[in-house]
């Protein structure tokens, strides 16, 4: 399979956990510790899926999406999935309006569920 996943997440524990379970399942994983680093990596293109945290230092998820959109680079990668702790936040709708495909509530998902969802998004 070897699909390429970009994880843009400032929480070290979650970033490491997501990276580990996805690599164990055969995915090629790149990580970015904040939105700025993630944006540089996303602009290179070639990722089959991007998992994007909304709340981050330097550049948040919405800023990331706005920058990708402004540079006409949304199509350089596969779907972008928002990672959030807030299930009913208006920020989610804004993220979806900016080009994200869906969102995952981090507190409600197990590592196994994450892998399953990633596979579904890649179908």
Image (cartoon, helix red, strand yellow):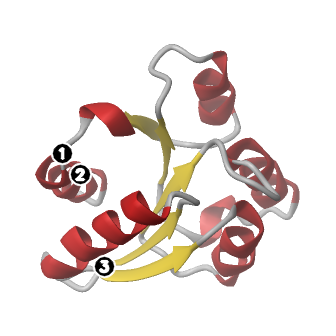
- Sequence order check, earlier mark of 3 and 2: 3
Question: Where is residue 113 drawn, in percent x and y?
Answer: 16, 46
Residue drawn 20% across the image and 69% down it: 21
The residue drawn where x is 66% and y is 80% is 41
Which residue occupies the foreground of this view, 119 or 20? 20
**Residue 25 on image: x %, y %:** 13, 75
Q: Earlier in the sequence, mark 1 or mark 3?
A: 3
What is the spatial separation of the Cα atoms under label 2 and label 1, in whole angstroms? 6 Å
Image location (x, y in percent) of residue 35: 71, 61
User: Percent from the top left, x then y, of residue 59?
Assistant: 79, 55
Q: Nearer the viewer, mark 2 or mark 1?
A: 1
Look at the image and tell me in which quarter the C terminus lies: bottom left
Choose top left, top right, bottom left or bottom right for residue 29: bottom left
69 with respect to 82 (left or right): right
Residue 4 is drawn in which quadrant? bottom left
| Depth order, front residue of 13/61 | 13
- The dot on residue 110 is 1
Q: Which residue is mark 2?
A: 114
Is residue 107 toward the left or the right of residue 62 in the image?
Answer: left
- Mark 1 and mark 3: Cα distance apart in space: 21 Å
Callout 3–callout 2 Cβ contact below 8 Å: no
């Amino acid at each position: 399979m070897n699909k390429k996943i970009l994880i843009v997440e400032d929480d070290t524990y979650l970033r490491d956990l997501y990276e580990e379970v996805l690599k164990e399942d055969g995915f090629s994983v790149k990580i970015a510790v904040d939105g700025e680093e993630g944006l540089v990596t996303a602009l290179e293109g070639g990722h089959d899926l991007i998992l994007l945290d909304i709340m981050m230092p330097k550049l948040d998820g919405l800023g990331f999406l706005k920058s990708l959109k402004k540079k006409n680079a949304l199509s350089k990668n596969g779907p972008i999935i928002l990672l959030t702790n807030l299930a009913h936040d208006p920020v989610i709708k804004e993220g979806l309006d900016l080009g994200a495909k869906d969102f995952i509530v981090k507190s409600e998902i197990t590592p196994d569920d994450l892998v399953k969802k990633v596979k579904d998004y890649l179908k």
